[in-house]
Amino acid sequence: MLYSHMLTAIFLIALIILFTRLLPFLFFRGRNPPEILNYLERNIPPLIMLLLVLYCLKDVHWASAPYGSPELGAVAVVIMMHLWRNNALLSIVSGTTAYMLIVKALTST
Amino acid sequence: MIDTKDKNSGTFAVFKAALQKTVPVMFGYVPLGIAFGFLLTQSGYFWLYAVLMSIIIYSGATQFIAIGLFMNHAPMIEIAVTTLLLNLRHSFFGLSLIRKFSDIPRVKPYLIFALTDETYALLTVTEEPRPQSRAQYYLFISLLNHLYWVVGTLAGALLGKVVKTDLKGMDFALTALFVVLAIEQCKQSRSLKPFLIGAVTGIICLAFVPSQYMLLVAILSGTVILLLLRNKR
C-alpha cells in the first residue's frame, strides 16, 4: 500500500526545510544563537541517525526464526565494509546484496 | 554596444568560474540523485514526485529519510519533527552567511532556499572572481548545484520507471544508508553520548511504543535526555 498523503507530506517537508534555512536570517541577525541550540545541533543528528537504523528494523521478528539474522548480518557487513573502505556506495551495495543473499538462502532451504 | 558586450562576456566568465568550482559537487549530486529517483519510483511512487521533491525540498538526507517514512506510513507529525530536528544544522550555516548575503538582496531569497551542505561549503571557502559579480557568482553556484541534483533525480526516476526489478530485500538499502550515515556521524562527533542515548531510548521505544509512533517518541525522549545530560560528558 502506498503512502496516501504523499503530496501533503512533500510540501510539509519542503516548508520545514525552508524554515530551517530561513531561521538565522529571521531571528539571529547579527547576534549569536543561544548556546543550547548549538548543543542540540551538534548532538541531535547522531542521535537521529541511530534511531533511524532502529526504526528501519522495527518490523523484524526477533523472537521467531530466523531471529533477525539477515538484518543483523547485513548491518554487520555494512559496518565492516564502511570501516574498511570508507566508500558509502560500496558499503550500501555490499550490505544490500548480503541481505538479499541471506534472505534467499534462508527461504530456499 | 561595447558596454553590453563587455557585460555579457563578464557574465559568461563568471558562469565558467562557477561551473569549474561546482564540478566536484556534480560528481556527488548526480549519482546520489539517480539513487534517490530510482529508489522512490521502485518503491511504487509516481516518478514526477521524485523530481518535485528534488526541486522543492532539495535536501539529500531528508529525501532518503522521507522514502523510509513513506514506506512505513509514518504519521504527519513524525515526518515534521524528524525533518525539523534533522535539519537544524541549516540554521547554523545561515548564521555565518548573514553578512555575506546582506548586500545582494536580489538573489538572497534563492540563495537561502538552495543552501545545502555542499553549496555552503563552496560559498564559504571560495574566492569570488570580482567583487562586483559576487551576486552572480553565488547565484550560478547555487543554481548549478540545484540543477545537478534535479537532473540526477530525473534520470534515476525515469530509470526506475523503465527497469522492472523484483529484488526482494532491496529496501534494505535504506537501512544500510542510515548505518553509513550513523558511522559518519560517529567519526565527526566528539562524544559517544548521543549514540548511547539513541541506543537506549531506541531499544526501549522499539519494545514498548506502538511502531507507528516509535520514531517520534524516541526522538523526543532522546532530545529531552540530551538536554537533561547537557553538562555531562
Image: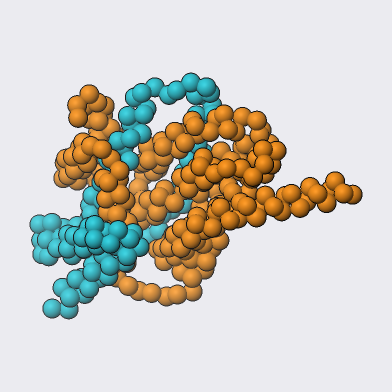
Chain colours: A cyan, B orange
Find residue B16 and report its image quarter: bottom right
| Residue closer to the observer: A74 or A2 | A74
Residue appearing at x 33%, y 31% in the figure: A40
| Residue closer to the observer: B122 or B167 | B122
In this view, B16 is above or below B124: below
Residue B171, x across and y down, in percent: 32, 63
Residue appearing at x 11%, y 61% in the figure: A67
Residue B213 shows in this picture: no
Find residue B67 and report its image quarter: bottom left
In this view, B4 is above or below B96: below
| Residue closer to the observer: A42 or A13 | A42
Residue B191, x across and y down, in percent: 23, 37
Residue appearing at x 61%, y 51% in the figure: B18
Q: How many marks?
A: 0
Q: Quadrant of the C terminus of chain B?
A: top left
In this view, B68 is above or below B75: below
| Residue closer to the observer: B64 or B164 | B64
